[in-house]
Image (cartoon, grey):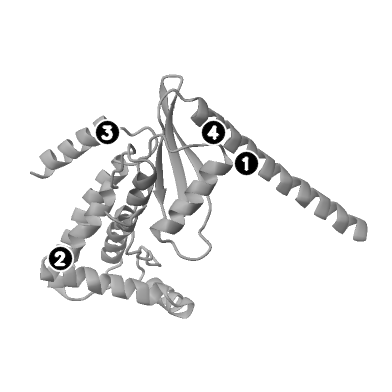
Amino acid sequence: CQSKNRKWLDDYLQYEFTIYDMSDDILAQVISDLISSPAKFSLQLDETADLVFVRYGKDDVIKGDFLFCKPPTATTKAADVKKFVDNFFRDNGLSWNMFVSDGAPAMLGRLSGFGALVKSDAPHIIVTHCILYKHALVTKTLPPKLAEVLKIVVECVNYVRNSAMKHRVFNVLCNEMRSEFEIFLYHSNVRWLSRGKVLNRAFAMHCFGNSEFILILAYMADIFDALNHLNRQMQGGGVNIIEAEENLKAFKKRWA
């Protein structure tokens, strides 16, 4: 039995070290490509996800890769994020050549945001704002009736999802009602895309009885779903500014 356990431990450790070795090798390849790239590189980061992606040129092709993930130990203020990005650059022989920050609003404050801190060290760097977060501002100016429906749906969803017992009871209720779905999708106020999914799921589950409320919910679910589709077209690997602009023009023409 001891020999079997020892073998299992040896296999596990070997597997773990293999994963680390593969990860280090991939990172080394990306770093090498960045250093040898004839063009300046750009970064995309989000302090709420603790992820950093990089886009750079190689062999006349624009490539996008995951660069690193290093969760901050305490707070996620702009200065904290700037520090761990600086440390990563220093440890891997990188420098601030060109940096495009595609991040949350808190990251891009004029005086104390991440972009401002970076530009204080490297004034030539270009900083842009993630366009998806601008959509989040729209919900702050919704007409009162629409805002109230959104608020009620989000409160209901988070009430159910915040407790395992409530979640199980709700699941049983949906089964008894023969609903197409049995769970709510959790709403995150940081992510615009979560609102569209939440509204669509809430409407499909037929949880509300007021006819006017249901009409408004259906209307909002359609609008948010269309915006979600546009947002997905604006993201992903290989998407450039020309494609993004064409998708935006087509969306405006379709809904004009």
The mark lying in front, picked from 1 and 4, is: 4
- Secondary element type, mark 1: helix
Q: CA distance from mark 3 to mark 2?
A: 34 Å
Task: Residue at 29%, 43% (x, y): give it.
Answer: 128
Which residue was labeled with disc 1? 23
Looking at the picture, which amino acid does disc 1 mark?
Ser
Q: CA distance from mark 1 to mark 4?
A: 11 Å
Q: CA distance from mark 3 to mark 1?
A: 31 Å
Q: Which mark is residue 241?
A: 3
Numbered marks: total:
4
Which is nearer the N-term, disc 2 or disc 4? 4
Q: Count residues near mark 2 (Cα–Cα under 10 Å), then give few for <14, some for 14-19, many for 20+.
A: some
Looking at the picture, which amino acid does disc 2 mark?
Ile
Task: State the image coordinates of residue 34 (x, y, percent, origin top left).
Answer: 49, 31
Looking at the picture, which amino acid does disc 4 mark?
Val
Which quadrant is the N terminus positioned in?
bottom right
Task: State the image coordinates of residue 253 (x, y, percent, origin top left).
Answer: 11, 39
Q: CA distance from mark 4 to mark 3?
A: 23 Å
Task: Residue at 40%, 61% (x, y): give it.
Answer: 77
The mark lying in front, picked from 3 and 2, is: 3
- Looking at the image, which is closer to me, 145 or 82? 82
Task: State the image coordinates of residue 183 (x, y, percent, origin top left).
Answer: 40, 67
Q: Count residues near mark 3 (Cα–Cα under 10 Å), then give few for <14, some for 14-19, many for 20+.
A: few
Q: CA distance from mark 1 to mark 2?
A: 49 Å
Which residue was labeled with disc 4? 30
Q: Count residues near mark 4 (Cα–Cα under 10 Å), then give few for <14, some for 14-19, many for 20+.
A: some
Which is nearer the N-term, disc 3 or disc 2? 2
Q: Count residues near mark 1 (Cα–Cα under 10 Å), then give few for <14, some for 14-19, many for 20+.
A: few
Which residue was labeled with disc 2? 216
The mark lying in front, picked from 2 and 4, is: 4
